[in-house]
Amino acid sequence: MLSFEEPVWAKEMAEGDFISHAPSYETGKYFDLFDEYYFESHVTGDIKYYVYNPLKHGADPDDKYPVLMFFHGRGNSLDGNKVINYSMAEYYASPYYQKTIGGAFIVVPVANEKINDKGDIENDWNTNYIEPVLGIKKLFFEQYKKNAGKSFFLGSSAGAFFVWEFLCSHSKDVDVAVPVAGGKIPDEAKLKEIQENGTLILSMHGKHDELIPYAEEVLPHLEKLKKFKNIILFHPEWVRNGDGGVAQLNPCIEMGQHCLCNQVTANLIFDNGKSYDEVLFPEGMTGWIRDHK
């Protein structure tokens, strides 16, 4: 049951601002546009992954399309195919998002998470998944070599940690990386290597994140991140829902300001059509992807 107790950050809100308790979009609306596959892995166990194929939905078979790989947060796989939504991927398969991007493949790998005897989550994203995920990516690009364009890795929370870890060893295999509300930002030498390998990074993190504190996980790295021309920063003061209210989400622990993933799902566009950031995202996240594909 959701709790609507006043969050600790409420006292920092501006006068006249308000708390919003839910995103505006519906979960599950586009699940039937995804097909399910498995990738064999002896290290992690076979990995399920969902695919949206634009060629099955009217896209020009002679054109190229970016491949958007989405990585979910910790525990999200335990809710079945809802992981498609939780990973930020669902609405990028919608006709409107696809039209704005100009078409895109979507791949959603799923970690083999489980609850152990102590009630803790095991087998969430970790370095053991790096080579299998690389295998999924290479297999997909081989299968669709005529149509697969740039590779985008978008990860939320634990998925964002994984994106950073993946970049540290395989940045040559990622054209664009979008870590959302994650940590484990690499040192300067590794960031320089990633830049030299040509990867563009969009770092996204709310400044009032309750689970991955901005002051601890991002702020100490901020000046370092600003040195690199391939790194774009989007660190909003407040994570807001579509109605413009400051986002609260408390299924068991407060995480409304952590779940910037919900706003990425909503295309970084408010219900009234205004962008979250008119400079960075004048046409939302889909427009940003289109401009960098």
Image (cartoon, rainbow, N blue to C red):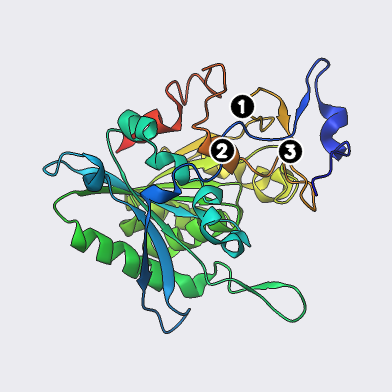
User: Residue 277: image x %, image y %?
Assistant: 53, 23
Q: Tell me which residue sits at (73%, 72%) in the image.
A: 120
User: Residue 9: image x %, image y %?
Assistant: 83, 35
Q: Is residue 99 above or below residue 123?
A: above
Q: Is residue 28 visible?
A: yes
Q: Is residue 30 left or right of residue 86?
A: left
Residue 140: assigned label: none
Closest to the camera, between mark 3 and mark 1, is 1
User: Residue 16: image x %, image y %?
Assistant: 81, 15
Structural distance between the alpha carbons of marks 2 and 1: 12 Å
Q: Which residue is mark 1?
A: 242
Q: Is residue 185 left or right of residue 228?
A: right
> Which amino acid, mark 1?
Gly
Q: Is residue 257 above or below residue 132?
A: above
> Which amino acid, mark 2?
Glu
Q: Which residue is mark 3?
A: 208
Sequence-first disc among 2 and 1: 2
As helix, strand or loop, the secondary structure at mark 2 comes to: loop
Residue 26: assigned label: 2
- Asked if the residues shown at circle 2 and circle 1 are in contact, with their CB atoms under 8 angstroms apart, the answer is no
User: Residue 31: image x %, image y %?
Assistant: 45, 49
- Pick out the residue farthest to the left: 62
Sequence-first disc among 3 and 1: 3
> Which amino acid, mark 3?
His
**Residue 97 occupies which quadrant of the picture?**
top left
